Image (tube, grey):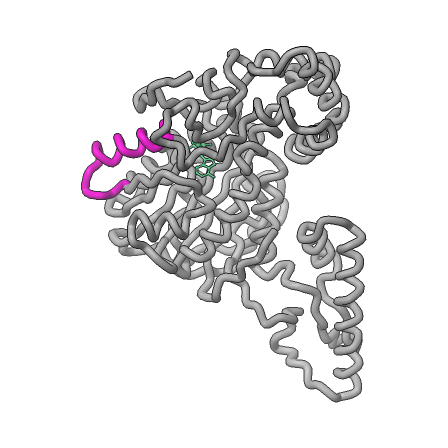
Amino acid sequence: MTSPITAAAFSHTPVLLQECLHYISPITALKPFVTRGAGTGRRRQGLAPTTPAKDTSAYTFVDATFGGGGYTKAILERFPSARVIAIDQDPAAFKEAEALALKIGGDRVLPVRGKFGDMVALLEKELGLKGPCIDGVVFDIGVSSYQIDQGYRGFSFRTDGPLDMRMCSDKVHGPKYDLLANSSLTAEHIVNTFSEPDLANIIYENGDEKKSRRIARAIVKARQAESIKTTKQLADIVLKGAGKYVGAIHPATRTFQALRIYVNDELNQFRQGLLAAETLLKPSGTLVGVTFHSLEDTILKNFLRTTSGATIGLGLRYYKEKGRYGYQGIERYRNRRISEVSSIAAMEKLYQQDIERLEERRKELEEGREVFDVSKNQGDEEGMKPSFQILTKKSVAPSDEEVERNVRARSAKLRAAVRTESEPMGATV
Ligand SMILES: C[S@@+](CC[C@H](N)C(=O)[O-])C[C@H]1O[C@@H](n2cnc3c(N)ncnc32)[C@H](O)[C@@H]1O
């Protein structure tokens, strides 16, 4: 099934657009602020820019998920001399970026087709850009309304289509895009060939689906009678396996999300994309991430916590008032370790080893065999310095008006941070 790639039909309403514009503006200096929220009286604290950026002519932004170009267009309007590198792996989105580049002219839109996880290599190969050269990167993670609405892409069961789900599918777009297609892994291949336990794990891990085992069993049983080829077929099988609707949500929603995430390796792409952004951002450059479910948000949150130093290891701290040394940040450290290792048992082992190492050091300090630098009272055992400073202490959610206008925005969360001058940490989360 081959369909023409049309640029004109691309429709997607950008989510949290004003918030994204606010946080993407590169920041020249930060000062701490404390305010009381209007109405609630709740205390808010964070970091605010002190001096507005002056010269915007040289700004280069990366829109890592161009889609229909909602963010790119708003950035170009807000910074009239800046340019935007528009990345997307989807040929339809790329075509849209090419059309915008032509319309705007002046090399202000630089379309790049590829995966944002490969951003460092892509920018070097396509544009000759290397090292910290970017003033702001935005990720708007997930799938666009356009992709969902095109039944032949296989993302949705609302319209029947082939079970493909690749964001860059050679089958849909023709052999020209072979190189970018996510190998031959389609949702159809997964549901028809993967073992029952593998299917259950994929659905549980990527869809947070409690009925994953029942659904996997139903899929395996159904495929013994005939292979599962279409979205509608799969949705009916899941409906039978998972039981009734809960509210208005179709029981297959989570299964479809899980398969899409797995087919496109979305979570690893996001991890790699964040690492790439850390390498490419200049000091004072900003990172903005918009996510739509907790799996993505947790990756972003942990990445920012780790790189901002909020969870850089377990350290020793001198408690003046108590006149003794103690450990700093145990809980946060444990949480970080949990996200790094595959099992709780492995985490406990690492944790125990680190505690023993610190215990040894504490003895050395107390016996005066080593001098503790109180001014560096950061618990930073490996000498790492934060590569980001978090701008959003809590995630930013869309306003009620936005959710009313665009129901897709209801689960969106935005987090932002500013790049410091320190070396990239390359932390995996
Ligand atoms: C939610 S949409 C972005 C919408 C966009 N912000 C707008 O305003 O129109 C996400 C886009 O990211 C693209 N995408 C998802 N994962 C990607 C990846 N790993 N590399 C490149 N593009 C990706 C999808 O193809 C899709 O077009």
Q: Nearer the viewer, residue 55 or 98?
A: 98
Q: Nearer the viewer, residue 286 or 178?
A: 178
Rendered image quadrant of residue 42: top right
Q: Quadrant of residue 100?
A: top left
Residue appearing at x 36%, y 53% in the figure: 134
The boundaries of the magenta stretch are 91-109
**Is the stretch drawn in magenta largely helix, strand or loop?**
helix
Image coordinates of residue 179 in percent, x first then y, are 40, 37
Whether residue 378 is visible here, answered yes or no, is no
Residue 278: image x %, image y %? 47, 55
Residue 100 sits inside the magenta stretch: yes
Classify the position of ligand 1 by quadrant: top left, top right, bottom left or bottom right: top left
Give percent across and percent down for residue 58: 26, 54
Toward the left, the furthest residue is 106
Q: Answer left or right for 195 relative to 80.
A: right
In the image, residue 152 sits, relative to residue 186, either above or below, namely above
Image point (56%, 33%), residue name = 292
Q: Residue at x 65, y 15 (%)?
A: 248
Q: Does 327 appear in magenta?
A: no
Is 352 positioned to the left or the right of 387 in the image?
right
Total number of numbered discs in the rendering: 0
The quadrant of the rendering that contains the N terminus is top left
Q: Percent position (x, y) of residue 164?
A: 51, 23
* 229 on left or right of 175: right
